[in-house]
């Protein structure tokens, strides 16, 4: 029996075909990617991915591809967007701003006290030691502001800052995300949500590993 393909998989397959229409030599040069005749390699949230140069499929591994995993929708779409749609001369401003103030971002899904971010903040509440250790596991650089604050690399060329405050008697747990002002030169706003969703998934994964 053939497994039904959901809309996420359809989108991923479609983007794999789009990827093949772009000049891979340009991608290699722009981001100094490792490559061979079969694969392009890129690091995304402290994990190595490879893109098949003939099919566009994306895979990841934690052990030099002895064991291979297919990238999920959020992983693949973020990588495709950065490789295919980033501006030609994109570069960091080295100025971090709240992602809500990025020029193309509108209030709603990314509002810090609603939905997705608040659910994640609530998950982290009471787990500051585990969250800190998870950030360290992802090669984060610890910062000062907040109960837990780290600079993490979405990609080696694109950092992001997370700041977390525990709940107290007056306020709920709070999660603040700071991005380089030029982040949307590297990816679309929607893709930033995919990337953040995956970042939080990776942090939770590391926290579960530590908990055992």
Image (tube, rainbow, N blue to C red):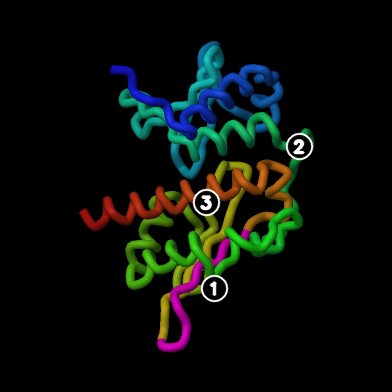
Residue 110's spot in the image, x, y percent? 59, 60
Which residue range is magenta in the image? 169-178
Q: Is residue 176 magenta?
A: yes
Is 156 placed above or below 150 here? above
Residue 30's spot in the image, x, y percent? 70, 30
Name the mark on residue 159. none
Q: Quadrant of residue 185?
A: top right
Residue 59's spot in the image, x, y percent? 44, 27
Dot 2 or dot 1: first in sequence order is: 2
Secondary element at image label 2: loop
| Position of residue 125 in the picture relative to residue 84 (left or right) | left
The residue that appears at 44% across and 53% down in the rendered structure is 200
**Image marks 2 and 3: residues in contact by CB distance under 8 Å:** no
- Residue under circle 3? 196
Name the mark on residue 145. 1
Mark 2 surroundings: few (<14), some (14-19) or many (≥20) residues within 10 A: few
Dot 1 or dot 3: first in sequence order is: 1
Q: Is residue 148 magenta?
A: no
The residue that appears at 24% across and 57% down in the rendered structure is 211
Tell which of 48 and 23 is nearer to you: 23
**Mark 1 or 3, which is nearer the eye?**
3
From this viewpoint, which residue is outermost toward the bottom?
169
The residue that appears at 62% across and 46% down in the rendered structure is 190
The residue that appears at 48% across and 54% down in the rendered structure is 140
**Mark 2 or 1, which is nearer the eye?**
2
- Residue under circle 2? 87
Secondary element at image label 1: loop
Dot 2 or dot 3: first in sequence order is: 2
| Position of residue 22 in the picture relative to residue 46 (left or right) | right
| Position of residue 112 in the picture relative to residue 25 (left or right) | left
Q: Quadrant of residue 80?
A: top right
């Amino acid at each position: 029996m053939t497994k039904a393909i959901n809309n996420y998989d359809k989108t991923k397959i479609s983007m794999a075909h789009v990827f093949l229409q772009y000049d891979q030599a340009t991608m290699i040069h722009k981001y100094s990617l490792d490559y061979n005749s079969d694969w392009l390699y890129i690091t995304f949230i402290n994990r190595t991915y490879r893109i098949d140069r003939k099919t566009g499929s994306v895979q990841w591994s934690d052990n030099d591809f002895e064991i291979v995993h297919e990238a999920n929708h959020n992983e693949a779409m973020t990588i495709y967007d950065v490789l295919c749609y980033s501006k030609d001369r994109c570069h960091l401003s080295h100025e971090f701003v709240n992602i809500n103030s990025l020029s193309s971002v509108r209030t709603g899904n990314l509002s810090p006290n609603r939905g997705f971010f608040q659910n994640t903040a609530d998950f982290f509440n009471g787990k500051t030691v585990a969250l800190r250790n998870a950030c360290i596991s992802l090669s984060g650089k610890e910062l000062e502001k907040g109960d837990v604050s780290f600079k993490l690399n979405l990609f080696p060329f694109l950092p992001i800052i997370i700041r977390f405050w525990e709940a107290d008697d007056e306020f709920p747990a709070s999660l603040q995300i700071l991005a380089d002002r030029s982040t949307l030169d590297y990816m679309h706003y929607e893709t930033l949500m995919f990337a953040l969703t995956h970042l939080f998934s990776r942090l939770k994964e590391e926290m579960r590993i530590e908990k055992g």
